[in-house]
Image (cartoon, rainbow, N blue to C red):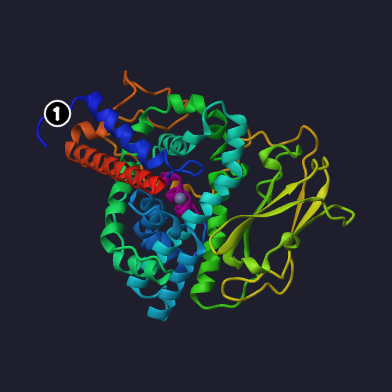
């Protein structure tokens, strides 16, 4: 492209790309958030071959896996995005690795696949940590429309941590395509490659453009912005990354063919780090949530699979529901019928009768004790006393280039305070890299055409 595109035109097209890519996935965190939690979880792994493989050596593969599921939503076939979010696809990848490599953490090519698989898995479970806890809390507490929260979360993350990550694409599209066939829904290699390229356009748009001006989104979602990096926040990014770390450890056992499912539960809200944050049963934070590191056979699940007991051993009345999963369940919620008793102790019990995708059950019930806060003692999230980050390397690993006009993150400045651009759209980097801008715009237009085509097809179906 030669010549210079008028800024207003460029801004509107980038906003279009952003809206199309991110606005259609309400109730989900953005792609930068998924990548962050996948990396933060990997950083927390104990030193050893697993951490070396997925964090130290093959991080780009983990990063790409972490936005691969949402990339599929940009394709003609909605299920190209939906299917990789769930245990059916994850387990097909585990099976493929086991069939092709004796020691997946030793062979270099296998490590790429392991890291990509872990990224996919991290994406799926962090959609659920976020959607079950942080998303409904923002809907209750923030004045803005929660439908725009996913984009706002990515804007906050890039801005607050000055995190400049627009990943180069790496993927084994032949294997990823094969896995779609393995789960009974063939997708071509070309469709996978195209979708990842379009998703990268969206990531670039948020990172290079939208994140420089968070003011509007800060006004819409002030509570979410204050809370999302606080480790005590139910469903916040530190919470999600903790669940991810445990998921990785469980997946390592699955790759080794282990029958040990004592670690079936990879996270709960509340837990030791994230205490129960509300007594009022109508508050989003009164809900208990359980995350599994294996798909659970729905036939083995019932309302009796999860029990909550009070200090006297009595069952607490409440509704037990499967929250997420495909054929295989992986998230369960408990909504109490009444308020939690202030300052009281409880036990959350997951019954050993659950059966995993692999046909295994824990040898004993899994018991998680927790305590309700005293009245008026709910944590004041994101205020004084915020615990330190669990992943300092991830927090600083992708800095903005030193010669960048920042206007982002850093220091003690209030987010948004350091802006010097007069309008709602800054072209920062891209004004000097028009090739990247052109690529973004082409991607935006291509995606717009796809959406139009989808809409036409949908109208055709409903009319017939
Ligand atoms: Zn997703």
Q: How many marks?
A: 1
* Region rendered in magenta: 31-41
- Residue 426 image point, x, y percent: 29, 27
Which of these two is toward me, 401 or 206? 206
Q: Main secondary structure of the magenta part?
A: helix
Residue furthest out toward the top: 422
Q: Residue furthest left?
A: 2
Q: Is residue 362 left or right of residue 174?
A: right
Residue 135 position (above or below residue 323): above
Is there any visible trace of residue 40 in the rendered image? yes
Q: Residue 360: percent from the left, percent from the top?
A: 63, 75
The outermost residue toward the front is 464
Disc 1: CA contacts within 10 A as few (<14), some (14-19) or many (>=20): few
Closer to us: 368 or 31: 31
Element at badge 1? Answer: loop
Tell which of 13 and 44 is nearer to you.
13
Instruction: Name the quarter where the N terminus is drawn.
Output: top left
Mark 1 lies on residue: 4
The quadrant where residue 375 appears: top right
Residue located 57% across and 49% down the image? 129
Please state if 319 lies on the left or on the right of 136 as rendered. right
- In the depicted structure, whether residue 311 falls above or below residue 297: above
**90 within the magenta span:** no
As drawn, 315 above or below 159 = below
Which residue is more in the foreground, 347 or 88? 88
Q: Residue 82 placed where, x, y %? A: 44, 55
Left or right, 91 with respect to 330, comes to: left
Does residue 393 appear in this view? no
x, y percent for residue 102:
41, 81
Cβ of mark 1 under 8 Å from ligand 1: the answer is no
């Amino acid at each position: 492209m030669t010549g210079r595109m008028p800024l207003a035109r460029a801004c509107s097209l980038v906003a279009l790309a952003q809206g199309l890519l991110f606005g259609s996935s309400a109730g989900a965190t953005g792609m930068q958030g998924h990548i962050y939690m996948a990396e933060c979880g990997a950083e927390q792994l104990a030193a050893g071959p697993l951490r070396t493989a997925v964090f130290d050596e093959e991080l780009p593969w983990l990063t790409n896996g972490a936005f691969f599921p949402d990339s599929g939503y940009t394709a003609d076939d909605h299920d190209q995005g939906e299917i990789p979010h769930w245990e059916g696809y994850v387990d097909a990848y585990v099976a493929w690795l086991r069939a092709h490599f004796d020691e997946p953490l030793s062979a270099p090519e296998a490590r790429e696949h392991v890291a990509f698989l872990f990224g996919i898995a991290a994406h799926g479970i962090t959609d659920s940590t976020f959607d079950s806890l942080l998303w409904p809390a923002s809907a209750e507490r923030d004045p803005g429309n929660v439908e725009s929260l996913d984009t706002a979360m990515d804007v906050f993350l890039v801005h607050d941590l000055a995190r400049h990550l627009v990943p180069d694409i790496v993927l084994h599209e032949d294997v990823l395509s094969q896995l779609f066939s393995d789960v009974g829904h063939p997708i071509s290699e070309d469709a996978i490659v195209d979708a990842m390229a379009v998703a990268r356009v969206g990531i670039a748009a948020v990172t290079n453009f939208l994140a420089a001006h968070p003011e509007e989104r800060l006004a819409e979602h002030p509570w979410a912005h204050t809370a999302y990096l606080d480790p005590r926040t139910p469903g916040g990014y530190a919470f999600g990354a903790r669940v991810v770390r445990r998921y990785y450890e469980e997946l390592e056992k699955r790759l080794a063919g282990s029958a040990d499912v004592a670690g079936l539960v990879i996270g709960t809200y509340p837990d030791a780090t994230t205490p129960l944050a509300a007594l009022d049963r109508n508050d989003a934070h009164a809900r208990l949530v359980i995350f599994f590191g294996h798909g659970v056979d729905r036939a083995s699940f019932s309302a009796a699979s999860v029990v909550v007991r009070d200090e006297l051993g009595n069952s607490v009345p409440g509704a037990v529901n499967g929250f997420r999963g495909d054929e295989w369940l992986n998230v369960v919620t408990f909504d109490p019928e009444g308020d939690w008793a202030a300052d009281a102790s409880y036990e959350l019990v997951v019954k050993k009768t659950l059966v995993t995708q692999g046909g295994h059950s824990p040898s004993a019930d899994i018991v998680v004790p927790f305590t309700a806060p005293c009245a008026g003692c709910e944590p004041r999230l994101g205020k004084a006393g915020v615990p330190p980050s669990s992943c300092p390397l991830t927090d600083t690993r992708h800095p903005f280039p030193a010669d960048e006009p920042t206007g982002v993150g850093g220091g003690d400045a209030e987010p948004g305070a350091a802006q010097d651009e007069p309008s709602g759209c800054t072209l920062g980097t891209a004004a000097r890299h028009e090739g990247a801008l052109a690529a973004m715009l082409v991607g935006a237009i291509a995606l717009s055409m796809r959406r139009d085509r989808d809409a036409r097809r949908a109208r055709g179906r409903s009319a017939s």
